[in-house]
Amino acid sequence: MQSMLHFCLAIVVIFALALIVSYDRKQIKIRYIIQLVVIEILLAWFLLNSKAGIVAVSSFAGLFDELMKFAGQGTEFVFGNMSKQGLAYVFLNVLCPIIFISALIGILQHFRILPWVIRIVGTVLSKINGMGKLESFNAVSSLLLGQSENFIAYKGILGQQSPRRMYTMAATAMSTVSMSIVGAYMSMIEPRYVVVALVLNMFSTFILLLIINPYDASEEPEPELSALHEKQSFFEMLGDYILAGFRVAMIVAAMLIGFIALIAALNALFSAVFGISFQELMGYVFYPLAWIIGISGQDALHAGSIMATKLVSNEFVAMLQLKDIAEQFAPRSLGILSVFLVSFANFASIGIVAGAIKGVDEKQSNVVSRFGFRLVYGSTLVSLLSAAIAGLVL
């Protein structure tokens, strides 16, 4: 009963925060929101508590565990026994496997398996979320193709989209994660929470978008999605995806170096001036949100600090910090916080999404850039909603 009351409070707060920035409150479709919330709660319970759901989650996590082992063989060949000696752990065991997973995604894309999955799942989702097919297809393709590569798949139709629809597409990309880095997440936090977050974030995104950015999808052009498959030779495609994976790994490495160094400098500066580190201060700022989504009072301060770190830097930095102190959290708090961390909701993602769109359509890139704060705000609410729903069933 107490967890249900806590969840109801979380829903009220999150929906109220979404209403503050809503573009058109009169067009909000209450029926679809209630429908999606019920479906998401049932999915969360199924994945975390039912025998069949636990088996499904374990199997998916086990698949990525095997893939990470294969990726490790390529890493070992290039870098020798550095990994076995515990050297450069993050680079060798977290970042390098992204290259292999990216190559696999390219193969599935080339043989039209991913476009088929995107169409089937997207069509089903469009029947239950009250949104258009493009919005639903984009939610699935963002997850499978990645934050940057996703917009390349829509390059033939991106220029036709209205600003409101561009907000939806960009917000979806920031609220989910790429399948190519799921294995990296699983090396830092418990794999089952990564799998659960993948599912919950998709539905939470639809719910929050129906509040923040409601519009009649039937009034928007529903383009042909032939752009979902680009014709290339097999080895040309494979080379492109391997290099794309390498670029992602290097971008993440650069961001980790820069952000961790900046946070260390801020901590030292704040400690010298105010007697409290920057992360401790941000922990107090995010403490109420951590408590609202179900994290226990004794864990909420540490959790708030990690949540803030994710927002101002990225999820990798936050996950690495959580990995070091995970044993200090109660199991339920750890699960809720882990689900919150699995998304691209941070300030750096604005530049990544806008840059990806700029390579396809410069005008639409400028449109998305103007949404900057609202995109981060909305995608953070998505993470809070997913975490709150996970907390209800944990």
Image (cartoon, helix red, strand yellow):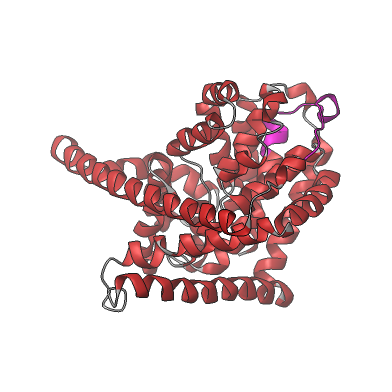
Q: Indicate the position of residue 17 as horizontal and vertical percent values.
A: 59, 32
Q: Which quarter of the figure has residue 41?
A: bottom right
In the figure, is residue 296 to the left or right of 254?
Answer: right
Looking at the picture, tell me which residue is in the foreground, 276 or 251. 251
* The magenta stretch spans residue 203: no
| Image location (x, y in percent) of residue 314 | 41, 46
- Classify residue 67 as left or right of residue 246: right
Q: What residue range appears in magenta?
A: 208-225
Q: Where residue 283 sits in the image (x, y, percent)?
A: 36, 45
Q: Please say whether residue 277 is visible from this viewpoint.
A: no
Q: Nearer the viewer, residue 269 or 304?
A: 269
Rendered residue at 61%/25% (across/down): 20
Q: In this rendering, is residue 390 above or below 55?
A: above
> Which residue is drawn at the image coordinates 59% and 48% (left, top)?
176
Q: Examine the rendering and report whether any part of residue 49 can be seen.
A: yes
Magenta-span inclusion, residue 218:
yes
Residue 296: x, y in percent?
47, 57
In the rendered view of the protein, which quadrant contains the N terminus? bottom right
Q: Quadrant of residue 91?
A: bottom left
